[in-house]
Image (tube, helix red, strand yellow):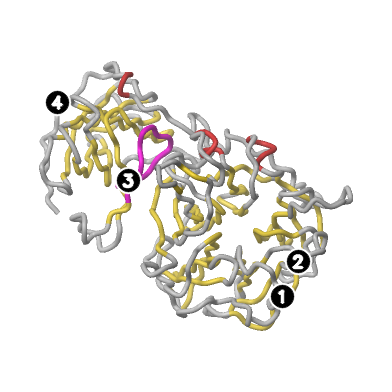
Amino acid sequence: MNHHVTPQAGKQKEGTVEPAQPELQPKEIGKLRPNANPLMAHKFGADPYALVFNNRVYIYMTSDKLEYDSDGIPQKNSYSSINRITVISSEDLINWTDHGEIRVAGSQGAATWASQSWAPAAAHRKLDGQDCFFLYFANNASGIGVLSAPTPVGPWTDPIGKALVTRETPGVEDVTWLFDPAVLVEDHQAYLYFGGGVPEGKSERPDTARVMRLGDDMISVTGKAKVIPAPFMFEDSGIHKHQHIYYYTYCSNFHEVDRAESDPPPGEIAYMTSTQPMGPWTYQSTILQNPGHFFGIGGNNHHAIIQLADQWYIAYHAQTLCQAMDIPEGYRSTHINRIEYEETTGRLKAIQADYQGVSQLHSFDPYQAISGATIGWSAGVNTLQLTSADHGLTSASDVVVSKLHGGSWIAISNVNFGEDGASGFTALLSNQGEAATLELRLDREDGPIVGKVAIPSTSEAYQWNVQSTAIAGSQGTHDLYIVLRASSDHSSAVLLQEWKFERVK
């Protein structure tokens, strides 16, 4: 890696407002300020599952990717070639770091025996005193695999070299769809929930949901899978525990049959409760209507329920970004909203899905190394997953960076610079085009400039440079806008790998 340090630029006048160039400003789409939903606007992510570790939530998602016809026109999602899982994480639920994709299935994946990877579930457990992480995934509807890693983001390996659950697993021989796993980890035992599909003539009681014990190693199953008698079961197993009650959640099927008032309507998230992780279960109600009710575009309903700090949340997907882009249906984006319980009964209250989403949990600390792929809101930005071998990186693993073009920007919400403000800013960059300027603005993309980083042109494709500038006028808490300003036209493009501010000494 070639690092070149640019001398600090002279200090800006405090509160300086320099006009932006409106003709170069891309438009934000999907996730619009100040909304929290969808979680990201630069890529899709479906079938969310959430894992909390060290006060940070990691979201694992099916990697929906645009499919095109021979003329390059986007087509409806066929789901037929998805073999990767997307991972993002956040400490505050507004600013999300893109960790890229896990190569799960296929010849280039960790699990070469699998052809696809859908609807993941993740779990953490200490084994022999070490933190261990496990990713369970569906190989289409034919079985469930497992990967393991020493961190929530990898590197991931296949510890058993085959599927964890297959048609030969006791108790699952007649399950229509062997997919959509969920995991519950207790102190001394872990459980795997999965299944789905509707056998002909069994809309009301498909009996295709299952639960079974995981082995102590988390990569084996023990005993026989047990039926969860979920009314109108379709797919999307979920599990969580709240105040000694176990909640099994799932998506109801869409079959057009007569339903009693107490039955779940089509395509909604329903739930059952038990005092034991394997039942017996009592059906309660539905908690989340189909996305079409809230956003005007329907499709399947998929969710995960998590606790972060003292609050409970539901992650779910909807085709909001797809709709905003005005492209064919089938591409999902993850959202998060709050969950509340009735104090006396423990029943889950109905959830109102919306674009507003959740409040930021706490302010953002800019005085630490921040991944360039950390985004609150953005316009004209995408992320790239670079390999160390091909892109001059010193890291042994892949690195995810943001790519900014002339006029594009990244916004970080609620950045706490402190009473004294910052004295400097440093970024690790790679210029992919003509000379440009990285502007650091407050509160708006055309707000006051507190620093500028001059980025010279380069002839080397992946030359990574450490470049800095002095900062003035950043006292207090602000939204931070990182704006790439082109020197002449739209040909400027910069890869942002990492950045941080420096405190006043």
Q: Which residue is mark 1?
A: 174
SS label for mark 1: loop
Q: Which residue is mark 4?
A: 10
Residue 9 lies, in percent from the top left, at 14, 29
Q: Main secondary structure of the magenta part?
A: strand
- The residue type indicated by label 3 comes to Ile
Asked whether 328 or 211 is in front, the reply is: 328
SS label for mark 2: loop
Of the image marks 2 and 1, the number of the one nearer the N terminus: 1
Viewer-side label of 3, 2 = 2
Q: Is residue 395 visible?
A: yes
* 33 horizontally vs 497: left or right: right
Q: Examine the image and state in which quarter residue 234 appears.
A: bottom right
Q: Is residue 238 visible?
A: no
Q: CA distance from mark 3 to mark 2?
A: 49 Å
Vertical position of residue 126 compared to residue 290: above or below: below
Q: Which residue is mark 2?
A: 199
Q: Magenta stretch containing residue 205, yes or no?
A: no
Viewer-side label of 3, 1 = 1
Residue at image point 77% right, 60% down? 273
Of the image marks 3 and 2, the number of the one nearer the N terminus: 2
Residue 117 lies, in percent from the top left, at 50, 63
Q: Which residue is mark 3?
A: 370
Q: CA distance from mark 3 to mark 1?
A: 48 Å
Residue 84 lies, in percent from the top left, at 44, 60
Asked whether 194 or 305 is in front, the reply is: 194
Magenta region, residue range = 368-384
